[in-house]
Amino acid sequence: MRLSEFMVLPQEQKRSTVVKEGIPVAKKELPEEMIFLFQLTGFYVETHFSKASKEIREYRMFHHSPELNASWQPIGLTG
């Protein structure tokens, strides 16, 4: 899937695609939300998860990985 195709998906399909196809890269905890960064084929997606509603409130998409500063925690894959 290309970034342009992902951008026009309905919210539920975006969630499903990130969960099924995304590789978790890093997470950041803020007072009201958790942000997770996923790598998909050819692009990256940040999911902004509301702690109060327990729902993804926003998706941010990037062609290249955003710069990860010290506030990001790497997500290690075990296997």
Image (cartoon, grey):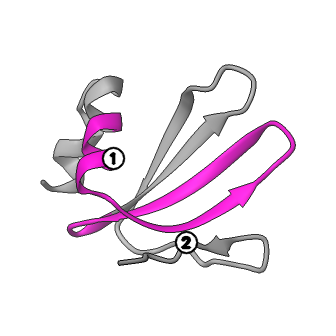
Can you tell which quarter of the image residue 75 is in?
Answer: bottom right
10 Å crowding of disc 2: few (<14), some (14-19), many (20+): some
Can you tell which quarter of the image residue 28 is in?
Answer: bottom right
Across and down, in percent, residue 50 comes to 67, 31
Query: Left or right of 48: which side holds 23?
Result: left
Q: Is residue 19 above or below residue 39?
A: above
Q: Residue furthest top?
A: 53
Instruction: Name the one closer to the observer, 3 or 73.
Output: 73
Q: Which residue is mark 1?
A: 19
Q: Which residue is mark 2?
A: 75
In the rendered image, residue 16 lying in the magenta stretch gets the answer yes
Over which residues does the magenta segment extend?
A: 15-43
Q: At x 35% / y 26%, what residue is drawn?
A: 11
- Disc 2 to disc 1, how far (Cα)? 14 Å
Q: Quadrant of the C terminus?
A: bottom left
Across and down, in percent, residue 22 comes to 31, 58
Query: Left or right of 32: which side holds 57?
Result: left
SS at mark 2 in the image: loop
Q: Quadrant of the N terminus?
A: bottom left
Give residue 9's mark. Answer: none
SS at mark 1 in the image: helix
Query: Left or right of 64: which side holds 35?
Result: right
Q: At x 21% / y 48%, what residue is drawn?
A: 4
Residue type, label 2: Ile
Q: At x 29% / y 40%, what residue is drawn?
A: 7
Residue type, label 1: Val
